[in-house]
Amino acid sequence: MIFFFLLPALLMIAIFLFYPILRSLYKTLFIAVHNINPRYVGLNNYYKLLSDPVVLIATKNTFILMGAAIVFQVGLGIVLALLVDMIRFGKKFFRTVFFFPIVMSAASLALLFRLIYNYDSGLLNSLLEYFGYQPVLWLDAGKALLMVMIPTIWQYVGFYFVIILTALTKIPDNLYEVADLEGATNFQRIIKITLPLIFEDIKVVLVLVITGVLRVFDFVWLITRGGPFDSSQVLGTYMYSTVFQRRLFGYGSTIAVFIIILGIVITAVTRKILGKRSVMIN
Amino acid sequence: MRKQVLLLLVFALVFTGIVVQAEERVALRVVTMFAGADAAADAYQEAIEQFQAANPYIEIIDESATFDDSVKVRIENDFAAGNEADITMYFTDAMSTPIVESGRVLAIDQLLQADPEWANAFSQPALEQIRYQDGKLYALPITGFYEGLILNVDLFTRYDVEYPASWDKLVTAIEVFKENDIVPMALGLGSTPHYQIEHSVLKVGGAAAHGAGLAHGIHPMWIEGLKNIKELYDMGAFQKDTLTQGWEGARTLFKQGKAAMIVEGSWAIADCQNDGANTVTMIAYPKSGPLGDGTDMIAGFTSGMYLSKEAYHDPEKKEAVLRLYKFLTSKEFIKKIAEANGGLPAAKVTPARLTQPYLDGLAAFQAAKHVCLPIDAQIPRPAWQEIVNGIAYICAGRKSPEEVLTAAREIYLEIKRQ
């Protein structure tokens, strides 16, 4: 009986997720400009993918973004959650404030950051000029990736902070009371009790961060469009520009399939590395 | 007497029933680019409301939108999937391939022949310009455009700079504006160098070179044209962050009075005036070198109204869709749109109430020795996008124009094998 209740959801996922994925997989075998008159080319799109220098740059940038997201989104999320968990008053206030960027549209935040980075009359350059410094080209090839990483990472810190904070509430107080009686310092409490007990949640957060990075699009597209010279290109934006600007549907689908494969491989490797190191609370 | 009254009543009831049945509501989906910040958006809305008031049985589901890349792809995919609107305004140049090849739009020739009054209202050159490669008309033109150099007259007056009618004057203008911390030319080199590419190739190589395409190799003047953009970039003609800017950023800079010139089309004049904050004019882009011509302009008709074959052959929709289609391609509608956006009317009408910048632009258009369609109207989109993406690389010296054009031609040849 329960099986029938699951069917509608399964059907929706099959129609709107698995069918498009299979369709994309099929399209990778064709050259289809404007999505019409496809010509079968076998695995040519995959050979092209392997020799495409922009795919290499986009993959490298995606990994850089992933590393930064793991360090800053998960790291800051944990630090902020631990700090907020320690305070007696204002927990709700900090939870709301840190979570707030999540409810804002990524597109509007990206446009806001675009204005902040603008060379002419941007916020940063206006401040620099006010203090007597020369304006800076914030979105040049050397800094563009960093500049798009800042809002991309910043927006989701609050999301992971809330997940970790919720996990912290599951830890029984008596464990900390015993630690206090044993004379443990705050640092020891965190290392020996808190982190091991929320490790399962951290693992989930890590998987979410990794898969989330593979979907990054809006901030990069709206701030730099992957430029200049593809220096801030990520796989999501390259796939979009291949399909929507260059109208190469077959090759765009190949990039999409590559993203899916990459996501599966990285998630599997992450789970393998992290293993089953969780601690059960009895 | 009573019988006669009763009979009359019955007759009236039956007649009313027939009329009500005959005027059953028909819903028609329409897609145009007259939306958002488009200068003709209000005029279009007004016309649609007039049409609906006169034809209450037709419900118009207006899906008009600003045509960014995602909307264009959505329209193309709608045709590929058989989900197209009943009437669609879309491009008639190289971008028309997915629409026409879908086999879902009606060839209009016979309809036009059957209605000489409707047909004769169109400007013949406009019709010829949007004729498909198989010799048939699949769309009817509404509005055309001309492109050129839009100048901020206030800045030219303030700094006593002569209008750049020649290359030397353009260089002088660039120098003067740079000295005064004004961006000489606003341009989004990063994502929309389109108009600059067209003008640089046309004004360096001339009309024949501009129309050479990629079929017979790479025209040397295309290489020189792209080098000309780098020359301007090295000169500091564009804003500092041009490599990550698009047309929106460039236009904002111009609208704010921080840039003196912008290469744009007639559709942008209204926006560039920024509600009267800027006094602007449009001139032909100056020539560079002996082969270009100072008067030549990029202009023409590259869009039109398509009629869905399915809607036309649907007995319940046929009359209504044809009525709306004729309305949207009537000379009255075309005149209304031309008066709103200052573009070239596709019918034999004279737009009234045009302001000075439009009159200047039209005068430049009429004085042009050659009128050319944009390069992207002539070559397939993937090849064109390769050139567009390559401009930032060329300007920064990371790729040569030859490399970029060779890559574009390879894509062109690959597509032609399709």
Image (cartoon, rainbow, N blue to C red):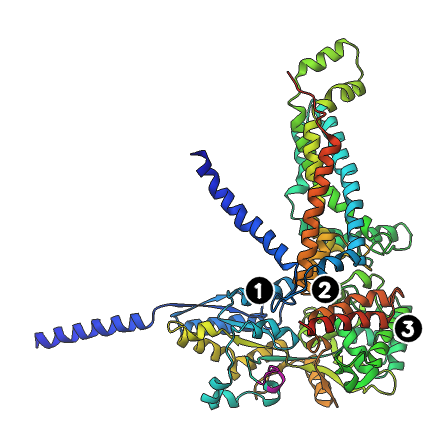
The stretch in magenta equals B128-135
Image coordinates of residue A111 in percent, x first then y, are 71, 54
Residue A106 as seen in the image, left or right of residue B304? right
Label 2 sits on residue: B248
- The dot on residue B175 is 3
Cα–Cα span, label 3 and label 2: 25 Å
- Name the dominant secondary structure of the magenta segment: loop
Instruction: Name the residue located 46 percent from the left edge and 72 percent from the top edge.
Output: B310
Q: Quadrant of residue B355?
A: bottom right
Residue B130 painted magenta = yes
| Tags 3 and 2 on a common chain | yes
Image coordinates of residue B381 in percent, x first then y, are 69, 70
Q: Amino acid at mark 3?
A: Glu
**Mark 3 or mark 2, which has the lower sequence index?**
3
For disc 3, the neighbor class at 10 Å (few under 14, some 14 to 19, many from 20) is some
Q: Amino acid at mark 1?
A: Asn
Q: Quadrant of residue B55?
A: bottom left
